[in-house]
Image (cartoon, grey):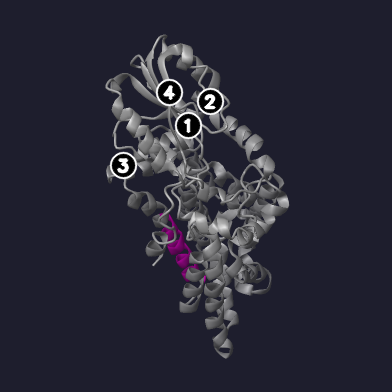
């Protein structure tokens, strides 16, 4: 059912998201790290490329990671002694939540939530059994979670003081914990070596995020978003938190509560984006579902049906707002309900016509078609490069283009390392943002024998609306040397 949902919660007017294009191109340039993310997503992208690079497979893997998350929640419910109602309640809560939205896009976030949940599940198993195999599973989940997204380190930063605060601190005298940590370090070491060799681009990326995006994050908005993410099942989360203190069988699991408190406090203090914390919640849906099953005894059986129905009924209106089921035109006609929930606010801190993610799924096919039309006219394709202003443009052209080896690049993000300089560049198809001041290309006029504007993105709903396409023919100077200088200027090191 979840697989079916993931393929039906987006209206046909929407294309892939700009971030998805970048991750797909990383699969063509396998490495132990990238400026924007660790390598795990690129491995998945490589599989997608082998499978034919269709939209079906792009959507398949985040859906699959979401299903694995659901399975782990089920396994946690089973280990906590839950029965059929707890399974149904937990499954409904996981499915009818922000996780469905996260699993819609091919980004590291779906795997991030999976690895957070797996770390917590391994801890639960260790608390129950004290079997030393579970710290090793924690280490494996932590290691691959780190190779997927550095965000998982916040889990550890919250978990360590929580362990010290509870009776679970005795894990620190278990030698297998340190052997497991050694295993985790071994797993992540190729990426750490890559970071060192490349002058720690993650630091540059975090500084860039802090200046351009996180600076616009309001701490109060972060807290409000936490309530919205699991609005229909928030009573399950509250039941879980309560159960650690009033339900005797769950008292030994208080480390989970304190881990939540420390990690969420850290995120709030650092002005993190709201979705960074989503990985915290699935394990608590397991605790809350089992506890409510115990509370709703045979006397209150009707409440079991009511709680599941409540989640479903509350999720239906949220489905209309939180997912791209309405066309851009319909959203533009009725923006008030989106604005009320802050969904029209972009990372620049301003309100726009569409939610940012939706605008990031518009105009890409149009761009690729217009670039293809120019590329087709150039006979000397071997000495031609498509140079874009940002990674979304470059990735979209590479994904949707009819030409298999068009190889669009940009000085933005990881593409800066993929600019082809092995052949002398004679022709350039230039893609420039709408806010670029040099409309007449005065900078390029002296460098080429012909400079012409050939088209623009006209989709009124696209974030890239007004982006211009220029064709620059017959270079009079060495374009390679100019690009080499630009690369040195724009690289993080």
Position of residue 374 relative to residue 15, above or below, is above
Q: Earlier in the sequence, mark 3 or mark 4?
A: 3
Disc 4 + disc 1, Cβ < 8 Å:
no
Which of labels 4 and 1 is toward the front? 4
Residue 49 showing in the rendered view: yes
Which quadrant does the C terminus fall into? top right
- Residue 262 drawn at (x, y percent): 68, 52
Q: Residues within 10 Å of mark 3 (few under 14, many from 20)?
A: some
Q: Earlier in the sequence, mark 2 or mark 3?
A: 3
Q: Dot 4 corresponds to which residue?
A: 452
| Mark 2 to mark 1 CA distance (whole Å) | 9 Å
Q: Residues within 10 Å of mark 2 (few under 14, many from 20)?
A: few
Q: Is residue 75 magenta?
A: yes
Q: Is residue 172 magenta?
A: no
Q: Dot 3 corresponds to which residue?
A: 49
Disc 2 + disc 1, Cβ < 8 Å:
yes
**Nearer to me, 299 or 16:** 16
Residue 66: image tag: none
Q: Residues within 10 Å of mark 4 (few under 14, many from 20)?
A: some
Q: Dot 1 corresponds to which residue?
A: 468
Q: Secondary structure at mark 2?
A: loop
């Amino acid at each position: 059912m979840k697989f079916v949902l993931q393929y039906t919660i987006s209206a046909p007017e929407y294309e892939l998201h700009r971030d998805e294009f970048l991750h797909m191109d990383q699969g063509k340039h396998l490495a132990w790290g990238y400026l924007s993310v660790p390598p795990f997503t690129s491995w998945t992208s490589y599989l997608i490329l082998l499978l034919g690079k269709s939209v079906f497979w792009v959507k398949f893997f985040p859906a699959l990671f979401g299903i694995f998350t659901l399975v782990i929640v089920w396994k946690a419910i089973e280990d906590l002694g839950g029965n059929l109602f707890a399974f149904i309640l937990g499954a409904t809560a996981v499915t009818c939540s922000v996780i469905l939205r996260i699993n819609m896009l091919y980004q590291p976030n779906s795997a991030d939530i999976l690895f957070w949940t797996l770390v917590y599940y391994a801890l639960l198993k260790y608390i129950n059994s004290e079997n030393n195999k579970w710290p090793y599973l924690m280490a494996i989940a932590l290691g691959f979670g780190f190779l997927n997204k550095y965000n998982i380190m916040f889990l550890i930063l919250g978990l360590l003081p929580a362990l010290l605060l509870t009776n679970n601190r005795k894990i620190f005298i278990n030698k297998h914990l340190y052997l497991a940590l050694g295993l985790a370090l071994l797993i992540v070491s190729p990426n750490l070596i890559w970071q060192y060799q490349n002058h720690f681009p993650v630091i540059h990326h975090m500084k860039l995020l802090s200046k351009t995006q996180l600076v616009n994050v309001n701490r109060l908005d972060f807290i409000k978003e936490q309530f919205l993410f699991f609005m229909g099942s928030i009573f399950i989360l509250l039941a879980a938190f309560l159960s650690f203190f009033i339900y005797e069988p769950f008292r030994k699991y208080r480390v989970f509560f304190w881990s939540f408190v420390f990690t969420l406090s850290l995120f709030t203090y650092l002005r993190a984006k709201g979705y960074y914390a989503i990985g915290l919640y699935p394990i608590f849906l397991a605790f809350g579902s089992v506890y409510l099953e115990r509370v709703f005894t045979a006397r209150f059986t009707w409440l079991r049906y009511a709680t599941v129905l409540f989640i479903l009924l509350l999720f239906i209106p949220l489905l209309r707002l939180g997912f791209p089921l309405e066309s851009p035109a319909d959203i533009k006609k009725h923006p008030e309900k989106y604005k009320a929930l802050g969904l029209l606010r972009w990372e620049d801190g301003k309100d726009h016509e569409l939610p940012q993610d939706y605008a990031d799924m518009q105009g890409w096919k149009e761009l690729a078609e217009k670039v293809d039309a120019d590329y087709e006219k150039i006979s000397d394709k071997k000495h031609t490069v498509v140079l874009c202003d940002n990674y979304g443009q470059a990735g979209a052209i590479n994904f949707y283009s009819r030409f298999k080896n068009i190889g669009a690049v940009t000085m933005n993000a990881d593409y800066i390392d993929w600019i082809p300089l092995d052949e002398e560049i004679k022709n350039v198809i230039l893609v420039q943002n709408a806010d670029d001041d040099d409309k007449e290309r005065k900078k390029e006029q002296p460098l080429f024998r012909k400079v012409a504007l050939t088209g623009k993105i006209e989709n009124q709903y696209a974030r890239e609306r007004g982006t211009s396409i220029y064709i620059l023919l017959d270079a009079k100077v060495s374009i390679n040397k100019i690009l080499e200088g630009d690369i040195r200027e724009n690289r993080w090191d």
